[in-house]
């Protein structure tokens, strides 16, 4: 089993040395996607000449960084990819647990979940992030028939052949909405792995309008509804309760509270 660990980064000079040093304890196959960092990140990356790097000349977005990592893993013929963030919310010491889950060979996506179990030393997430995550997770479960508990955890192990079936194009932080819709479309096998909730810096921001929780939620839903049309076609099947149409795979967003 060939495995790549992919880490998107943008201005992570505070964390990148620790994260990469710890990650190298578990694998030699590491890809960093530097999304146009303007701080000391590029210089610090030169301390790791054996790590593969994709560098965006400008900031293209978190989603684009993941898409580029998926493409790289496919091109280099890796069988599995583990994605993790570089802000120390994802602990490299968890990588062996993901590998154990991979070796059970019963999933295409093994998604980390901060809310599957209450783990010792869990941090409290910022209230607006937890509320939006819960609302979006419940909506995805209802409309896609999923059974996940954490829609936005970026700590995942994915079968590369399965990733190659997903039609992903969302460049920003809303990529999980597109990812889960596409995973449902091709009926990937999904499991979750409990990971600790870590917020080393609860004041980290998204940037721009996404820092407003109401705007962020509306943006996520807009991306999701557009993706539902792409993945499953135009809405159809009128809801018996209100007469509104819904996608064949989904329940009516009004009657079912989505």
Image (cartoon, rainbow, N blue to C red):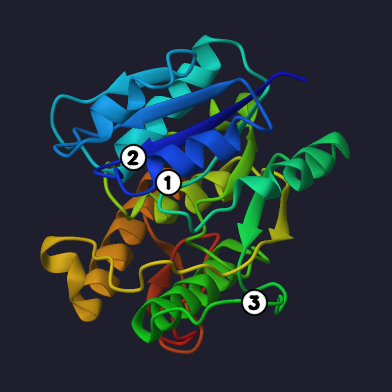
Please state if 216 lies on the left or on the right of 176 as rendered.
left
Please state if 203 lies on the left or on the right of 16 as rendered.
left
Q: Nearer the viewer, residue 246 or 119?
A: 119
Outermost residue on the right side: it is: 104
Label 2: which residue?
A: 9
Residue at x 45% of width, y 86% of height: 257
Q: Position of residue 8 (x, y in %)?
A: 38, 38
The mark nearer the N terminus, 2 or 3, is 2
Residue 86's disc is: 1
Q: CA distance from mark 2 to mark 3?
A: 26 Å
Quarter of the image with the N terminus is top right
Q: CA distance from mark 1 to mark 3?
A: 20 Å
Residue at x 30% of width, y 57% of height: 223
Q: Position of residue 247 (x, y in %)?
A: 46, 61
Can you say whether 74 is above or below 109 in the image? above
Please state if 183 lies on the left or on the right of 95 as rendered.
left
Q: Nearer the viewer, mark 2 or mark 3?
A: 3
Query: Do the numbered discs 1 and 3 sit on residues whose CB atoms are within 8 Å?
Result: no
Outermost residue on the top side: it is: 76
* Helix, strand or loop status at disc 2: strand
Query: Do the numbered discs 1 and 2 sit on residues whose CB atoms are within 8 Å?
Result: yes
Can you say whether 248 is above or below 128 in the image? above
* Helix, strand or loop status at disc 1: loop
Q: Position of residue 41 (x, y in %)?
A: 26, 34
Quarter of the image with the C terminus is bottom left
Residue 121's disc is: 3
Mark 2 surroundings: few (<14), some (14-19) or many (≥20) residues within 10 A: many
């Amino acid at each position: 089993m060939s495995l790549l660990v992919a880490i998107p980064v943008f201005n992570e000079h505070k964390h990148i040395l620790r994260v990469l040093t710890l990650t190298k304890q578990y694998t030699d196959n590491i890809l960093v996607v530097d999304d146009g960092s303007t701080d000391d990140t590029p210089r610090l990356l030169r301390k790791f000449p054996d790590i593969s790097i994709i560098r965006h000349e400008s900031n293209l977005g978190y989603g684009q960084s993941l898409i580029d990592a998926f493409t790289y893993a496919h091109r280099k013929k890796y069988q599995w990819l583990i994605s993790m963030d570089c802000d120390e919310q994802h602990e490299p010491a968890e990588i062996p647990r993901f590998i154990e889950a991979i070796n059970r060979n019963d999933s295409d996506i093994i998604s980390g979940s901060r809310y599957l179990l209450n783990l010792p030393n869990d941090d409290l997430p910022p209230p607006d992030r937890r509320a939006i995550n819960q609302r979006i997770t419940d909506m995805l479960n209802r409309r896609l028939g999923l059974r996940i508990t954490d829609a936005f955890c970026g700590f995942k192990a994915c079968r590369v052949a399965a990733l190659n079936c997903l039609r992903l194009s969302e460049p920003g932080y809303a990529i999980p909405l597109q990812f889960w819709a596409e995973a449902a479309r091709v009926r990937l096998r999904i499991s979750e792995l409990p990971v600790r909730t870590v917020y080393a810096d609860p004041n980290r921001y998204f940037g721009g309008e996404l820092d407003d929780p109401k705007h962020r939620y509306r943006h996520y839903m807009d991306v999701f509804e557009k993706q539902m049309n792409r993945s499953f076609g135009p809405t159809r099947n009128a809801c018996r309760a209100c007469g509104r149409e819904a996608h064949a795979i989904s329940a009516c967003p009004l009657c079912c509270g989505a």
